[in-house]
Amino acid sequence: MPMPRRVLSFVMPILIGISVYTCASVPKLSNQTEEAIKSVIKEPIPDMVTGKTGLASSENWNVWYESILPDSNPKGTIILIMGAANDALSWPPDFLSKFRDAGYRVIRYDHRGTGLTTQKDGAKDKTPYTLGDMSKDPIAILDTLHIQRAHVVGVSMGGMIAQKAVMKYPDRFESLTSIMSSGNIFDTMLPPMNQDILPKMISAVIKHGMLGGKKGKIKLQFVHKKILMGDATGKIEAKPLAQSALYNLEKRDGYHFIAGKKHQKAIEASGSRYDGLARLNIPVLIIHGEKDPVIPIEHGKKMASLIATSDTLWLENMGHDLPDILMDTICHKILKTIEKASLSTGK
């Protein structure tokens, strides 16, 4: 049934206004990035998953993981936990290779509702879960691989999950690295997250994720990265990011943006971790960017003030992402923390 003309005359200006705002609020990509995306789409897709993969059973979820071994016997294991609405392929390839090249087994996995992690028997259970529930997922992976202890690195929500994991399962972790995260995101004594970020992220999803086809979904990864950089500057290495995005679309199950809603509810239900963090006695590294537009650096500094065993890395030109230009600095500091943990345990 066609829409009445009177209703159409009212609705159309609103839709046009939304469209204009959506386009105007989304960062533009450089010609160089646009050309890199076009080039990657035409080329054969490189294999972005080269380690041992499997599914770990965690509550009513089958959690997809990849275990990447070094060339020699591993010195230890590093398990990586990504941020909200992101899957395992969101980790920069260079980030993975630096730890592997240093002699460590590296494990990454898809969060609940992302990538190839699905509910058992194809269920669509809408029961909410908490960060405490999500902290069982890395434990399930370690159990599946018969690994007793690991070093854990988490970013943003992944940092919150990592904090919860080391508090709940202290005998399973040798060190904790929490990057651009918080011990209590709703601490009223600290600056809140920038309220402009979420509308920009949603606008980008509408413009590129919903309306842009395959190329648009690849562009979306760049646009989101630029939004999360905030006022930080630095070149984004276009080809690896475009290849990873294309691989995710062609070889995996694509991007599940709706998972972010459940992840946000898990964060909201988690409460403060300050008391548990204050009792940690393993080496802890807290990394935060001074230009983080999502979780202000004061959250990282608050955690550092609570944890007696903490070390810190404050980065002036870093927003809410892992900048290519700072990858060496970040990974070097994490490896130093891991080495400190190994010395303390006599390994």
Image: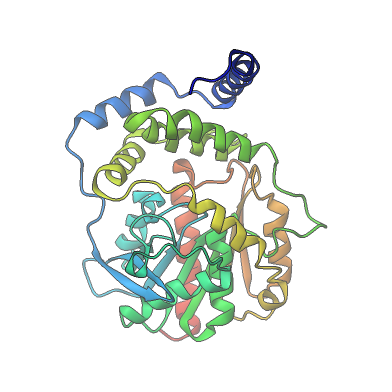
Display coloring: rainbow
Residue 79: quarter of image: bottom left
Q: Is residue 188 left or right of residue 152?
A: right
Q: Nearer the viewer, residue 244 or 298?
A: 244
Residue 132 visible to the viewer: yes
**Extreme residue in the front direction:** 1
Q: Position of residue 323 (x, y in %)?
A: 48, 43
**Residue 131, quarter of picture:** bottom right
Out of 219 and 30, give the one closest to the viewer.
Answer: 219
Most extreme residue toward the left is 44
Q: Residue at x 73, y 67 (%)?
A: 305
Which residue is at the far right? 189
Which residue is located at x 22 percent, y 57 percent? Answer: 50
Please state which of residues 46 and 210 is positioned toward the viewer in this rendering: 210
Quadrant in which the C terminus is drawn: bottom left
Q: Indicate whether 123 appears above or below 198.
A: below
Numbered marks: total:
0
State the image coordinates of residue 154 (x, y, percent, origin top left): 51, 62
Please state the horizontal and vertical placement of residue 30, each as a whole percent of the image. Answer: 44, 22
Can you give x and y, in whole percent of width and height, for residue 46 in the image? 20, 44
**Residue 282 visible in rendering:** no
What residue is drawn where x is 30% and y is 70%? 55
In the image, is residue 290 above or below residue 219? Answer: below
Closest to the observer, 71 or 272: 272
